[in-house]
Image: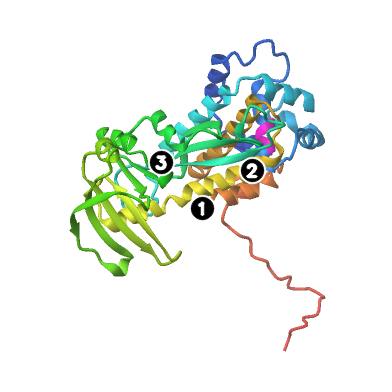
Amino acid sequence: MHSGRTIFSQLMDFLPRHEFNKCVTGYRGHYRIRTFSCFDQFLCMAFAQLTYRESLRDIETCLRALQPKLYHAGIRGHISKSTLADANEKRDWRIYADFAHGLIRIARQLYTDEDFGLELEQTAYVLDSTTIDLCLSLFPWAHFRKHKGAIKLHTLMDLRGNIPCFICITKGTIHDVRILDHLIIEPAAFYIMDRGYIDFGRLYGLHQQMAFFVIRAKKNLDYARRSYRHVDPSTGLRSDQTIVLQGPKSSQLYPDPLRRISYFDAETNRRFVFLTNNFVLPPLTIALLFKCRWQIELFFKWIKQNLRIKAFYGTSQNAVKTQIWIAISVYVLVAIIKKRLNINRSLSEILQILSITLFETVPLLQIVTDLQLQNQEEPFSNQLNLFHS
């Protein structure tokens, strides 16, 4: 019920507090803490993400300006730059990582039946990573190049609802393909990847675990054609072949046949070649399945825009991971609210609206609804109509 509460307070009502408290207890987050709790820290950082704050000083100034409303928003502790900096520095980032995974489980249940544009009974995942550049002098732990620092955000996204279901933050030097070793493979699911993940030994591991993959082939692929199927060139398809690998190493790493599909995308004027171990789906469905991969690029774009990468709130590894996991929690929380309130807007639109209305005292559903008020003309206006004929 609304009853004059702020938008921010209404948003936080959707957080499972019992789940958060379990995460805090598991890592002793409140050990020797008197006033500024882990939940206070989470709320302050969530406020920063939703309103695009640039620094700790920026967060402190804005929240102190809203001091009379903070108690009703759930923030009980005293807000100061140093207190928030210490919390980000010392409180275990795994508290917020585990809580984000709890929110992800809730979101995935809500989006189980979500349509992503293809009639596919199986679950479809997209695996990719993005590099976040860091200044090596400020972040000496994030080695990437000789004079450059960076971290990588490895993400496995469920296309039903665009929910990230696996996230791993590593140094920039970690190769993408190594993340396949950390995934819990779901049988019969599809894993969509770009050619940076080509490792035929690991792909054969997916195949043996009864999962399907769709991956772009490299230009120098050494293979022999076993058979082919006719395709309709008007759909963009160029070929649909059954092949076996002939490279001395690749043929041993992946001894079974593969399906090779060639597709020309008229929109980008590019030709793509895909490899998959699924021989049942139509070739056009395989091509369109890979095209859905752009959804994860939109997620990375949102993360980079909302994290304000050039101005992290802390320089330690703990502070950076805390900020990233809280940002992911905010993203998933908005996805949960969108589904539960049946809001007919994109996540980006909802976030833009929330960024300027967090401390308005109106119902949350009203502020993000698609209903638009019509401008009504005043019947007794004294203003002359300049365009009256």
Element type at marker 2? helix
Q: Identify the residue at image location x=64%, y=19%.
A: 91
From where the camera sits, is residue 39 visible? yes
Element type at marker 1? loop
Image quarter in which the N terminus is found: top right
Q: Please identify, in this view, whether the residue under mark 3 or under mark 1 is nearer the observer.
A: 3
Coordinates of residue 179 in the picture (x, y in percent): 44, 33
What type of secondary structure mainly makes up the magenta span? helix
The answer to which of 207 and 91 lies nearer the viewer is 207
Q: Identify the residue at image location x=54%, y=42%.
A: 130
Q: Identify the residue at image location x=53%, y=49%.
A: 298
Number of other residues with Cα within 10 Å of mark 3, as a class: few under 14, some 14 to 19, many 20 or more: many
Q: Which residue is mark 3?
A: 197
Quadrant of residue 200 within the rendered picture:
top left
Coordinates of residue 8 in the picture (x, y in percent): 66, 37
The vertical placement of 142 against 378, above or below, is above
Q: Which mark is residue 344?
A: 1
Number of other residues with Cα within 10 Å of mark 2, as a class: few under 14, some 14 to 19, many 20 or more: many
Which residue in the rendered view is the most extreme toward the left?
227
Coordinates of residue 103 in the picture (x, y in percent): 50, 32
Q: CA distance from mark 2 to mark 1?
A: 22 Å
The answer to which of 287 and 362 lies nearer the viewer is 287
- The tag earlier along the polypeptide, 2 or 1, is 2
Element type at marker 3? helix
- The tag earlier along the polypeptide, 3 or 1, is 3
Asked if residue 249 lies in the magenta stretch, the reply is: no
Q: Please identify, in this view, whether the residue under mark 2 or under mark 1 is nearer the observer.
A: 2
